[in-house]
Image (spheres, rainbow, N blue to C red):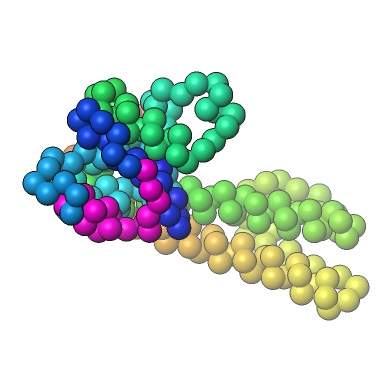
Amino acid sequence: MDTHLRSWSVIILTENNFHKRFSQDPKPENLSNYLNRHFPGGTYYSAYEASFCGFTIHRRLNKLGINNIVVNPADVPTTDKEKKQKEDGRDSRKLAMTLRSGELRSIYVPSLEMEELRSLVRYRKTLVKDIARGKNRIKSNLYFHGKAIPSEHQKAAKYWSNNFTQWLQSVTYNTEYGTMVLQDLIDTNLLLRKKLLKVTRDIRAAAKNSKYCALHGLLASIPGIATNTAMVII
């Protein structure tokens, strides 16, 4: 299957023959019904490339009796022509043929709990990036309007201290519109920092969970590895 948000391109091969190519709604139940209707009592195998849809489809297919695997797109044999000319039918046919020949290997599929813990750790990384972008927008806004950062705040601006934040909140422009934009940028950044603090605390709480505390303790004993890095590794 070549999976997309609105539809799937499906190629069905039997043990020795080509059966059919078709598009369907992105619902595992529809595929299961088709297979049970045309190949009752059969043994079904399927594959799709890891993508935006994660492992939800994989779990639902397996629950419906279809032996599914999720594959790394880089592990699927691809010619130079196929790289330059993407086409859903060709991609799904290639997956079906390599699946039938036994050339495909599944990537690791985490448990639901581990997958959601991973999303928490990744969310922290996203917040850090968003905060950095917000800081750059604020500084860009200051420079654009000719507001130089005072020398006594130059060092504080690097680490975004409370004193520097207070100075930022005291900055005004010639009109209420310019001041409004700057203050809104500052408020957004402060909100993100509060969210980052909460998520960091949530990760520390997860590290104390009985399932992870022993491994976390071993990892954190390595110089240079603190709680956040240890949980990323876990």
Q: Residue at x 86, y 56 (%)?
A: 144
In the rendered image, residue 128, in percent from the top left (x then y), is placed at: 53, 50
For residue 53, side relative to residue 38 (left or right): right
**Location of residue 181 (image quadrant):** bottom right
Please tell me whether residue 28 belongs to the stretch shown in magenta: yes
Examine the rendering and report whether any part of residue 112 can be seen: no
Looking at the image, which is closer to me, 15 or 218?
Answer: 15
Q: Which residue is drawn at 8% across and 46% down?
A: 41
Looking at the image, which is closer to me, 191 or 83?
Answer: 83
Q: How many marks?
A: 0
Residue sticking out furthest to the left: 41
Examine the rendering and report whether any part of residue 187 can be seen: yes
Looking at the image, which is closer to me, 5 or 128?
Answer: 5
Looking at the image, which is closer to me, 10 or 2?
Answer: 10
Please tell me whether residue 23 belongs to the stretch shown in magenta: yes
For residue 11, side relative to residue 187 (left or right): left
For residue 38, side relative to residue 94 (left or right): left
Q: Residue at x 80, y 72 (%)?
A: 179
For residue 108, side relative to residue 51 (left or right): left
Check the image and report above or below for 127 versus 94: below
Quadrant that contains the N terminus: top left
**Location of residue 33 (image quadrant):** bottom left
Check the image and report above or below for 127 versus 96: below
In the rendered image, residue 96, in percent from the top left (x then y), is placed at: 32, 33
Q: Give the range drawn in magenta.
A: 21-36
In the rendered image, residue 21, in percent from the top left (x then y), is placed at: 37, 43
In the rendered image, residue 220, in percent from the top left (x then y), is placed at: 31, 36
